[in-house]
Image (cartoon, rainbow, N blue to C red):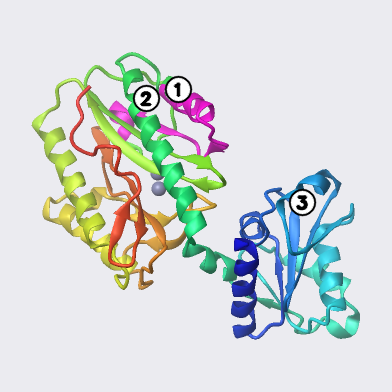
Amino acid sequence: MNEARRRRLAMKAAQAAGVNGLLVTHPADVRYLSGFTGSSAALVLAGARAALFTDGRYRTQAKAETSGLRVVVEQKAAALLAVEWLAEAGVARCGFDSTHTSVATLDSLRAVLPAGKRRGFFVGLEGLVAKLRQVKDSDEIGRMRRAASLGCALFEEVLQHIVPGIPESEVAAQLEFMARMAGAEAMSFETIVASGERSALPHGKASAAKLPKRGFCTMDFGVVLEGYCSDMTRTVHLGKPSQRELDVYHSVLEAQEAAVEIVAPGVTCGEVDEAARSVLRSARLDKYFSHSTGHGVGLEIHEGPRVASKQKQVLEPGMVITIEPGVYLPGEFGIRIEDTMLVTASGGEVLTAASPKVWMEL
Ligand code: ZN
Ligand code: ZN
């Protein structure tokens, strides 16, 4: 059982941080450690013991999806019961994720404890489970491969729907319809289809704007398959391009490939970012590259590590990251090219390699 192994690793990390219990409430973290896919639950770990607290809506589901832990179904707030369980289990110091817990919630959790136990009981551990999730195990890598492959198949299919005069929203609708028909549970995020001048908006959600006779069309989309997100961007051109459009496209492609090329264990995220950025700097386009080069992806669309300027975090085998440089020229056009990559023992593997990145004219 993957989840049991992950719980052991989480407990080990918690003990290394000086606590003997762990309270997990962020849904993606709960899922990672228990298999439970519902949106509301609290998971607690104390040594080798584990319990999942949820409400009546999830009675059948929680028992079916988990194993090796106690499932407690009650109408009372899950986190409060979880704290009672921790205290009874003999936990003296309990780690919780300070990035996902409000001050008000923490106060209410503390109030559950006997007065004498409150002081020093909760210890904020920022992103303890999120850090474990950065390195994918073989089961997760299999799921991410399948999600990425589905993304590539959808891109190929959607090309036939890219014709001048149809609204961007229709391109997005086609993508999303085909995704669901192919078994996707959801889209990873709101589909981006940005054409013509709108392609200069890095996050141009599909609008009513119609695809131009001549100009770019950027599509950034992802599916959720078996719980895991895919993420890819391709920019295609409708009609004959100008020399400038061709030149900028090839600079972005060169930057993207330079970053892809250096992905390997031991390389820092900052170095990957710089590989893309320096190509655009030589082409005097770096000031139009207004975001970071990439991000981790997995159960959530944006996870660690951050592939951004000066980031010292080192890549490790099993991490899955995106490489997505872009150039956005306001009032003219924009281009972004994004792959999802797995860091392997010897380098990197592009999971979205089935979708061509070469200049595409429709
Ligand atoms: Zn994307
Ligand atoms: Zn992305």
Which labelled disc corresponds to residue 174? 1
Mark 2 residue type: Val
What stretch of residues is rendered in magenta? 171-199
Q: Which residue is mark 2?
A: 158
Q: Helix, strand or loop at disc 1?
A: helix
Q: Could you say which is closer to the camera, residue 209 or residue 126?
A: 126
How many angstroms separate mark 2 from mark 3 (CA)? Answer: 37 Å
Indicate if the residue with disc 2 has its beta carbon within 8 Å of ligand 1.
Answer: no
Instruction: Identify the mark nearer the N-term, 2 or 1.
Output: 2
Q: Which residue is mark 3?
A: 62
Q: Earlier in the sequence, mark 1 or mark 3?
A: 3
Q: Vertically, is 125 above or below 208?
A: below
Figure quadrant of the N terminus: bottom right
Residue 192 forms part of the magenta stretch? yes
Quarter of the picture containing the C terminus is top left
Q: Residue furthest front?
A: 1
Which quarter is ligand 1 in?
Answer: top left
Residue, x 46% and y 34% (percent of image)?
191
Q: Amino acid at mark 3?
A: Ala
